[in-house]
Amino acid sequence: MTNLYKLIFFSTLFMGTMISISSSTWLGTWMGLEINLLSFIPLLKSKNNPYSTESSIKYFLVQALASTIFLFSILMIMLMNNLISDAISLNFFMMMTINSSLLLKMGAAPFHFWFPEIIEGMNWMNCLLLMTWQKIAPMMLLSYTLKLSNYIIFIIMISTLVGSIGGLNQTSLRKIMAYSSINHLGWMISAFLNNEMIWIIYFLIYSLISMTLILMLNSFNIYYLKQMFLLMNKNILVKFILLLNLLSLGGLPPFLGFLPKWMIIQYLSINYMYLVLFMIMMTLITLFFYLRITYSSLILIHNELNFNSIMNFSMKNNMMTLFLSFISISSLILCTILFNFF
């Protein structure tokens, strides 16, 4: 019965996103966003997690506020286009309001305050959905409406800054991944300044790397930095996959995560060199807390901690490790081929 209702809500979740990005009217996009929202909330409920109810209520309140602002803005634009002949300045304000509501929906800075708090009360699978699939519809709508270059530059700088600085003092891996997502959002939004299709490549690669890393952490039931000692006594393959994916997520060459960053740098360095330098410096800070995660599992040796009785490396985990290693190694090979191609 549980699997049946999850299947139903997953279907409506995907359907809501598809309605939103394929609709030809603003009201149709708003309806798709609402279907997506009301389908995601029941998926947040978990019997094993007492904080899931709190996260679902917070998520509903934030998304309902963003949807209200979005609906108000599109209705005001419709009224102004019909009643006022010269509404350029008012349209400018309303377009900025629409953009802000979409940025609030996806959790970009400076509208990010709900994102790390809500993600802390979720399990890893819901975190993966929130960081990947739930960003598709707002990003597509943002690519349709974002015409304000100064406003987008401000959002990019704030997102990369908050995403890098916010993750420095965190011990929860979910919050670290949340701030990492905010930083990557800044890079994705920067693609709108020149070539809007690059963000799709960036998003697909980011989703692949995040899925690999989150599946690994979920299989070992790891949520905090201190639990990275669990990987201390595992085989070298697990440690290698962890290191590979973290460095790839940080955008370190020659890993796959560097490829979309390289493309964005190549396009933006012509007209926005100072912005590119700022984004690169902020990404170097994110690499620091990625390496801190790796440091806990690869280098530290602590003989007093014995988790062998807690975490048995079963056949299921062995199969998961083989699957994740296949994805990681294939990603590295793909990146090498693409580097040679370009």
Image (spheres, grey):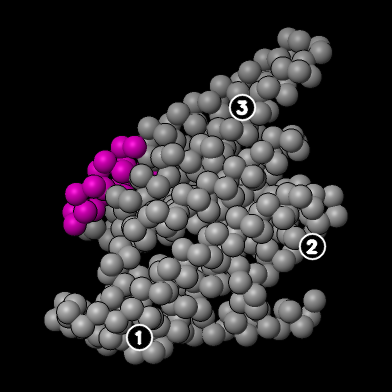
Q: Position of residue 154 (x, y in %)?
A: 66, 38
Q: Which residues are magenta?
A: 39-58
Q: Is residue 53 magenta?
A: yes
Q: Residues within 10 Å of mark 3 (few under 14, many from 20)?
A: some
Q: Earlier in the sequence, mark 3 or mark 2?
A: 3
Residue wearing tag 3: 97
Residue 266 percent across, percent down from the top left:
79, 62
Is 175 magenta? The answer is no
Closest to the observer: 23 or 92? 92
* Residue type of the residue flagged with mark 3: Thr
In the picture of the structure, the residue carrying the numbered disc 2 is: 266
Q: Quadrant of the C terminus?
A: bottom right
- Work out whether 323 lies above or below 78: below
Residue pictured at 61% horizontal, 30% vertical:
98
Question: Which residue is disc 1 drawn over?
Answer: 319
Seen from the viewer's position, the closer of residues 77 and 189 is 189
Which residue type carries mark 1?
Answer: Met
Cα separation, mark 3 vs mark 2, equals: 30 Å
